Image: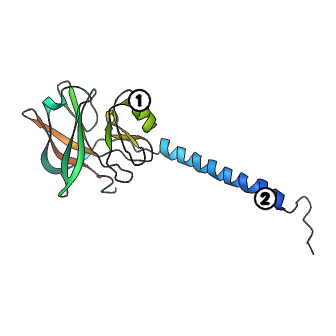
Amino acid sequence: MREPSPPGLRRLNRRDLLWVVPSAITAGFFGWLAWRTYVIHFTKTQVAEPVWRDGPRLKAAALSELDAPWRFRYFEYAYNGSPLQAVVFRLSNPVTGGLSINDAHFLALSRICTHHGCVVNYVDNPELGSIAYNYRTDHPFMGCPCHFGAFEPLQGGKAVYGPPRFPLPRLRLEEENGVLYATGYETPFRPLEQG
């Protein structure tokens, strides 16, 4: 025998579940979507003045290879004795952690994504970047093909879109006789070091 329901309350039946279950799933999905949107847009770490750790002195590029803004060159740097994919740019503006020589501005970044360690690429076509990475800009940027994170060179490698929270680590640059050398790296060197 059924127990009577308290006054003002009624028992759920199967028809009620046809409405309650999909509503709960929909509410859960939109709650997750709101959380994900918050994480993607508002939890990015700002780029600060770098703390450098000395490393090997390796050639990044000749100045003649970077003769105009947005020219770039991939190179390998050594991190704890292992090869590290890196990139050096000539930029249109000076950036924190970069090197300025007269009116030329340079920045070197690790190409290892701070999200899951994939190798990021130079996206030189802003229109393609806006479609593939959902990040609209009027100049090239760095994009991670694994989870479509975008990093902004004009902000010192800051993560500007997608799941990465931390900026790409910068490499210290020095110039000698028309050649740029990478001579150290920023700490913590994410994702290889936590801090």
Disc 1 secondary structure class: helix
Residue at 58%, 47% (x, y): give it.
33
Mark 2: give few (<14), some (14-19) or many (20+) Cα within 10 Å. few
> Where, by quadrant of the figure, is residue 92 drawn?
top left
Disc number for residue 186: none
Percent of width and height locating residue 73: 21, 37
Q: Which residue is mark 2?
A: 17
> Where, by quadrant of the figure, is residue 69 drawn?
top left
Disc number for residue 127: 1
- Residue type marked 2: Leu
Residue at 32%, 52% (x, y): give it.
190
> Is 154 drawn above or below residue 144 in the view shown?
above
Percent of width and height locating residue 96: 28, 36
Disc 2 secondary structure class: helix
The image's colour scheme reads rainbow
- Residue type marked 1: Glu
Q: Nearer the viewer, residue 166 or 150?
A: 150
- Asked if residue 89 lies left or right of residue 65, the reply is right
CA distance for labels 1 and 2: 47 Å
Answer with mark 1 or mark 2, whichever residue precedes in sequence: 2
